[in-house]
Amino acid sequence: MVPMPDQKELLWLKNVIVAKFTEENWLELGLVTDAIASVKGHSRLLRSLNWNDPDYAGHALNVLMNIVAQSPNNFDKIRDYVDAHFSEDEVFVSSKANVKRITFSPSVFEIPDGVTDKNLVSVMMPFATEFQAVYTAIKSACESAGFTCKRAPVDSREKDTKGKL
């Protein structure tokens, strides 16, 4: 049996697939991975998809694991297929080396261009008085660990205690 890939990424892929795949996507994925028999031969996968059955996610995971078990390259093919068809607003974050994926929600955030300050911690919370002790504790912990802590206002009209935005 082929060893399973990073389980977190496989589960993320399963969740995207369950949320967005149509029958056509499953058939295409089966062709791309040379595992069309696993897709078409599964007794419940496409039926549960088309009927919106509550057990669809489990069948999807089962078929994905079968496809990956057939060939170690299939995991990359699944990821590439999902990225090519559905990654415009979703990206997976992993501690695995050379994997750059980010999911922002809500969609008001954008991935910044340019260099990222790896020592910067951004705290987004209201500037209301009742949150001051929480922010002070976060900032103190960040500074103790050698990080710079900056507070981002929830509402751009809010000002910090020094009168700055």
Image: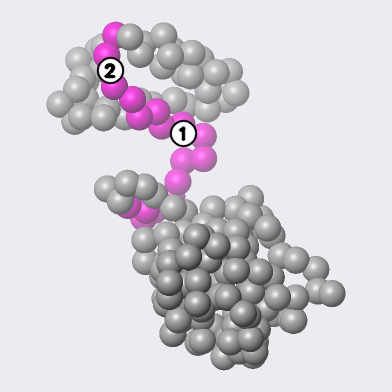
Q: Nearer the viewer, residue 46 or 65?
A: 46
Percent coordinates x, y for residue 142 in the rendering = 53, 23
Residue positioned 19% across, 22% down in the render: 158
95 inside magenta stretch: no
Up-down relation of residue 78 to residue 5 (above or below): below
Which residues fall within the magenta stretch?
Answer: 109-129
Label 1, on which residue?
Answer: 120
Percent coordinates x, y for residue 129 in the rendering = 29, 9
Observer-side mark, 1 or 2, equals: 2
Image quarter in which the C terminus is found = top left
Up-down relation of residue 139 to residue 40 (above or below): above
Label 2, on which residue?
Answer: 127
Question: Could you tell me how far apart the alpha carbons at marks 1 and 2 are, in whole angstroms?
Answer: 19 Å
Q: Nearer the viewer, residue 79 or 41?
A: 41
Left or right of 156, for residue 8 = right
Percent coordinates x, y for residue 53 in the rendering = 48, 65
Residue positioned 46% across, 33% down in the render: 120
Instruction: Report the predominant secondary structure element of the magenta stretch.
Output: loop
